[in-house]
Amino acid sequence: MELLAFLGDDKETWGQVTGLINNGDWDKIILIKSGRGKDFMSPKKSDTIIIDSSKQLTEIKNELMEKLKGKFSQLETCLSIASGNGKEHLAILSALLNLPIGVRLVVFTKKGVEFLT
């Protein structure tokens, strides 16, 4: 399984992403970072994509489509959007669906890694 996670300005959500990285059995980890999220240091090897969230939503989506193209070896990815805001989440979802890549929402809870879809 592959993990795609977003890291934004809201540092308090970074523990959620760290929990997923440390406790999931991931073949590949891709981190999309913006703002203060650029400071996040992954505890495991990962690919990093930097975006500028001040751009318009469609610009972010197009940039993500270009940067994510060819990154996935499977037809779906596990997606964490615990960090970030609605505009960033919409851009990521739209980019993935346009590639097309299926999405399984994933979170880290007291029970461990849980899939929401």
Image (spheres, rainbow, N blue to C red):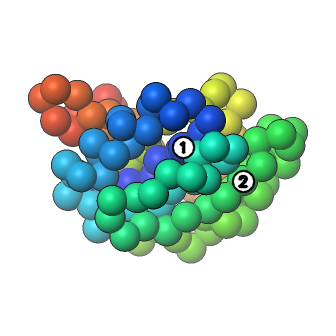
Q: Which residue is mark 2?
A: 51
Q: For mark 2, give the secondary structure.
A: loop
Quarter in which the C terminus is drawn: top left
Give how far across and how far down residue 85 sits, in percent: 64, 27
Q: Residue at x 61, y 62 (%)?
A: 49
Q: Amino acid at mark 2?
A: Ile
Q: Which percent across, then down, holds residue 20?
A: 29, 45
The number of callouts visible is: 2
Residue at left offset 84%, top offset 48%:
59
Q: Tell me which residue sits at (27%, 34%) in the image.
A: 108
Residue type at mark 1 is: Leu
**Are discs 2 and 1 less than 8 Å apart at CB?**
no
Q: Quadrant of the N terminus?
A: bottom left
Q: Taking 88 as reference, is 17 left or right?
A: left
Q: Residues within 10 Å of mark 1 (few under 14, many from 20)?
A: many
Whether residue 112 appears in this view of the structure is yes
Residue in view at x 72 percent, y 53 percent:
51
In the depicted structure, whether residue 18 falls above or below residue 67? above
Q: Position of residue 63 (x, y in %)?
A: 76, 58
Give percent across and percent down for residue 45.
Answer: 37, 70
Residue 60 lies, with reference to residue 82, above or below; the image says below
At numbered mark 1, what does the secondary structure look like: helix, strand or loop?
strand
Marking on residue 7: 1
